[in-house]
Amino acid sequence: MSLIRQKATEKGNLGRVGVVIGVPAALAFAFIAAAGWFTPDRLTPATVVRTFDSVDGPHPGFRRNHAKGVCVSGWFEGSGQASPYSSAALFRVERSPVIGRFALAGGQPYQDDAPDKVRSLALRIMPANGSEWRMGVNDIPVFLFRNARDFNSFLIASRPEATTRKPDPARIGAFLAAHPETARALSQIKQRSLSSGFADDAYNSLDTFLFVNADRRTTPVRWAIEPEQPVSTQNNVKAGRDYLFDDLTATLAEHSLRWKLMIVLGQPGDPTADPTVAWPVGRTRIDAGTLVLDKAEGEDGGPCTGITFDPLILPEGITPSDDPIPAARSAVYARSFTARSGETKAPSAINLNSTQSGK
């Protein structure tokens, strides 16, 4: 099976798919092969896409995961403090345009918002030198799975029963018994502090990447995007099925929102290939710059619609580590994009006036 990572054009035209430029083909091939996609009896990106459809139901034209979302835009302003660790241009003291997307985890585009649902932020940062950095970060401390096969198996185990419309507790229990690392990660996720919404939430990379500086010295890193807005824990009051998105878009209509990009530097012995394990508290943190978002737009024609937030689209100065999850995400995102590009899509749950912007 041949996998070609694809992306939309700058105009967000879903009908035109091109080969992604930014990750050398040999490197992409090596990491995708390492994820097991090319072995006949192993998982494939198409298999994962079909699994999402079987668990959440078919929703043509939507992303197979993080299906409910809204586009945002703004900029990233580098501080210069990360430049000793990475040669990426965006870390210099300069401003880079950003297109992003807030979303909820899961493949249901019309799901109700709830305080404990996993929130995500995807970003495309575009510095002036023509390179770009794409990422997806989540408001959980660790990832639930070590590899794509375990992720797919858990989705199957959590598929709702036809009679009860709920997952079978016995199947979930059997999976967790066989995967204690997932059980430990799930416990940490359940214990996380919940903020009031997207705007005052913190988002973590979960996976490990390598920063490469001008001297070709590498440093394993993870990162967190932490709000400058005051954090509120008043999260138990629901104000409508779309209250998380309503609060975000109403706030951006009034003023911009800001987060700090905090780079966490790994030390020898820190796990790089297992995203279910958190790094020890106290690791050196670098303030790499400020993310500012000042505009929200609906996905139906919005600037993020045609973007795959492929975690292997990296600028010079950042490379993958031995963590297998980014390569798996890259391949599945490409397959999902190909599928939704040829489908007729219903209107998104969050519809906004395209002229809405912060002041």
Image: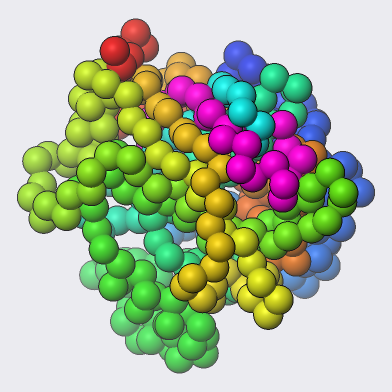
Q: Position of residue 13 (x, y in %)?
A: 61, 17
Q: Quadrant of residue 55?
A: bottom left
Q: Position of residue 6 (x, y in %)?
A: 72, 34
Q: Position of residue 66 (x, y in %)?
A: 44, 46
* Res. 65 in view: no
On the rendered structure, is 258 left or right of 165?
right
* Res. 201 in view: yes
Residue plotted at (30% across, 67% down): 192
Residue plotted at (27% across, 21% down): 255
In this rendered view, identify the residue nearer to me: 87 or 110. Answer: 87
Instruction: Give the residues in magenta.
Output: 63-90
- Residue 297 versus residue 238 in the image, above or below: above
- Check if residue 83 falls in the magenta segment: yes
On the rendered structure, is 189 left or right of 2?
left
Q: Position of residue 317 (x, y in %)?
A: 77, 43
- Residue 354 versus residue 242 in the image, above or below: above
Residue plotted at (18% across, 49% down): 232
- Residue 210 versus residue 246 in the image, above or below: below
- Residue 189 versus residue 61 in the image, above or below: below
Q: Quadrant of residue 254?
A: top left
In this rendered view, identify the residue nearer to me: 173 or 167. Answer: 173
On the rendered structure, is 187 left or right of 212?
left
Residue found at the very far bottom of the displayed protein: 177
